[in-house]
Amino acid sequence: MVPTSFYLILSALLFVIGVAGVALRRNVLIIFMSVEMMLNSVNLTFAALANHFMKLDGQVFVLIAMTVAAAEVAVGLAIVMEVIRHRDTTNIDDVNLLKG
Amino acid sequence: MLNYAWLMLVFPALGALVIALFGTRLGHRAISWLAPGMVLLSFGVAVWMFVTMLGLPVEERSHEVVLWSWITTGTFHVDVALLLDQLSITMALVVTGIGFLIHVYSTGYMHDDPRYPRFFTYMNLFILMMLTLVLANNYLLLYVGWEGVGLASYLLIGFWFEKPSAANAGKKAFIVNRIGDFGLVLAIFFIWTSLGTLRFSEVLTAAPARLATTGIATTITMLLLLAATGKSAQLPLFVWLPDAMEGPTPVSALIHAATMVTAGVYMIARSHILFALAPTSAAWVAWIGAITALFAATIALTQTDLKRILAYSTISQLGYMFLAVGVGAYASGIFHLVTHAFFKALLFLAAGSVMHALAGEINIRKMGNLRAKMPVTYWTFLIGAAALAGIPLLSGFFSKDEILWFAWQKSPLLWLVGAVTAACTAVYAFRAVFVPFWGKERDHKLFHHAHESPASMTLPLILLAAGALLAGYLGLPRQSAIEGWLEPVFAAGSGALATATPAVAGGFMRWVLLAVSALIALGGLAVAYWAFVRNTDVPRQVRESLGWAFTLAEKKYFVDDAYNALVGYIWDFGGWLARTIDQRGIDGAVNGVAGITGWAGGQIRRLQTGLLGLYALSILFGAVALVVWFVIK
């Protein structure tokens, strides 16, 4: 039996990697994947704690979050596709029309 | 029978409407019949009313015709109603009779004008409005007519609006008149608040009791006087009338000599009860009239533009009428109004005939010996000038003499001013005869082309000349027909101020003054003959010896320049106000607020870098900060 704290540490690591990916990388797709990683690190926390407290609420939350994430991915990828089609780039620094 | 008086208004209204709507399709011939025809029909109605009135006993001659109720709110009630009495029918006869002759003349004078229909629309409109003015039974309807004739005057002065001078003259007339109209409106307000009625007949009965304390009566009458000085071109508002000569000459004859400018005199005569209650204002009227008469007569002596001489002469003669109504001799004022209408319309139309012959030339120094070419114009002009000068047995003699007689009774000083004016009048009237019509021709080309005018123009001249010769016999000394005719109108109010109406009949003094008047007129004729025919070097010597005094009169005493300067100062002050308060003060505040907002926005927008990573980090740190905050708390 793996202790719950291991899951939480892994989850924290995944989240930090996701944050670092969003903050540091320039490629739209990588940033997108990093966002997904943060989302799933949270899902992992939910599942681990549900197991820890022997309650189903966390599991249900994970299912809902995954459903929403699927929809979000569809929208997000569509936006990415449009950005690539219009500006012929995946570099996020080139997409800065709203700069003040 | 007097109930049909509204027909007088219908005909010119119909004429103006038809010509305005279908004028261009009707063609010259139809308009030449229609426009004067409508005025003639109106004149016919006026004669009919007059004859009917003659057949009635004196106390039934004043008759009101209520056409419809105009305004009714609360206690305020005004009808559109006509007042027919001896005064209004006299005015209506003058307006329509002389108006008709001038319409006939205009068909000849304006024949080649491209805006022929428009001209007659305005002329008929003028007749309509003038009749509204003189036939109204209350001050409000009189005001409608008062403004209406002002509008017609504006339109006709600026009739040749392609000429900037004509357009400006029209505007000047309108704006100067507005100052006077302001006085009339205020006077109407005061009459309403103090008497509760605007009907002349009710004012007549209510005023003596309600306005016994003269304060309010003086206010009302001074405002009425302001209105009259505007419309009748008296000091200090006379400046528009000389410029009004930019309009076509028949307009000068009809509006700016015979009828409209006398509206002020008519209005004062109509308000006689109020002036009787305010002797101070009456004295002001008399003195303004006397001073204007002399003032304008001296200017007329120096002008070289034939129409301007006549214009200043009109101002001067209107001054006589003011003098008359100011000393309480209302009937004499109206009598002079009637005779003046004949001879001044005649003089203007004859001047127009001269202009017509000389291709628009108006400077008398370029004319000369015209009597050889234009006998009818010459003889009629001569009769008009003689009547104006007051040569014995012509119309001007009787009416002017009567005014001087009443002025003498009021104050010999007023008589003296009037007598000096009469001398000036005789000189300038005959100067206007001798210089253009006698002597040698001065401009060969002009003289060569000169010709007598067509019958449509000379016929009215002859008829008006007959009027100028004979109108004086309406008011013979001691047995004045017109005095007797008008007496009931003015007698009604004279009980309030018994001394306001001096005795008509005089003793020995009356005949002395009559003789003095005659001598003055004949003396003026002799001086003019000597200076302008026999010894043509005299005028130049007089000019040089008078020096600055002559220049003063020639430049119209710099009244126009004074007004220009005054208006200029007001204008500059307004500009200064606009610059400092509006541009610096108000605009400064508004622009300052906008500037501060813009500056702040410029500083803050630097945060929006366009770098996604930075945004993400801000969100992260923000979230972390919030978490830390909640945990620590």
Image: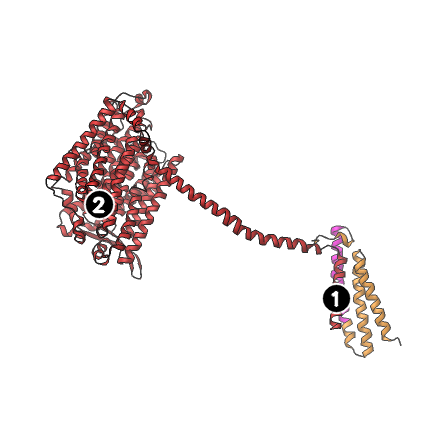
Chain colours: A orange, B red
The subunit letter for the residue under badge 1 reads: B
Residue in view at x 78 percent, y 75 percent: A58
The numbered mark at residue B623 is 1
Tell me: B401 left or right of B366. left
Q: Amino acid at mark 2?
A: Val
Percent x, y for residue B354? Answer: 28, 28
* B537 lies above or below B51: above
* B449 lies above or below B587: above
CA gap, disc 2 and disc 1: 97 Å
Percent x, y for residue B45? Answer: 21, 44
* B81 lies above or below B435: below
Please identify the residue farthest to the right as the structure is shown: A1
Q: Amino acid at mark 1?
A: Ala
The numbered mark at residue B273 is none
Q: Is residue B34 magenta?
A: no
The foreground one among B86 and B277 is B277
Percent x, y for residue B448? Answer: 30, 21
Most common secondary structure along the magenta stretch: helix
Residue in view at x 16 percent, y 40 percent: B405
The foreground one among B523 and A84 is B523
- State the residue position of label 2: B325
Residue range highlighted in magenta: A63-89
The subunit letter for the residue under badge 2 reads: B
Q: Do callouts 2 and 1 mark residues in contact (Cβ within 8 Å)?
A: no
Query: How many marks do you count on the picture?
Result: 2
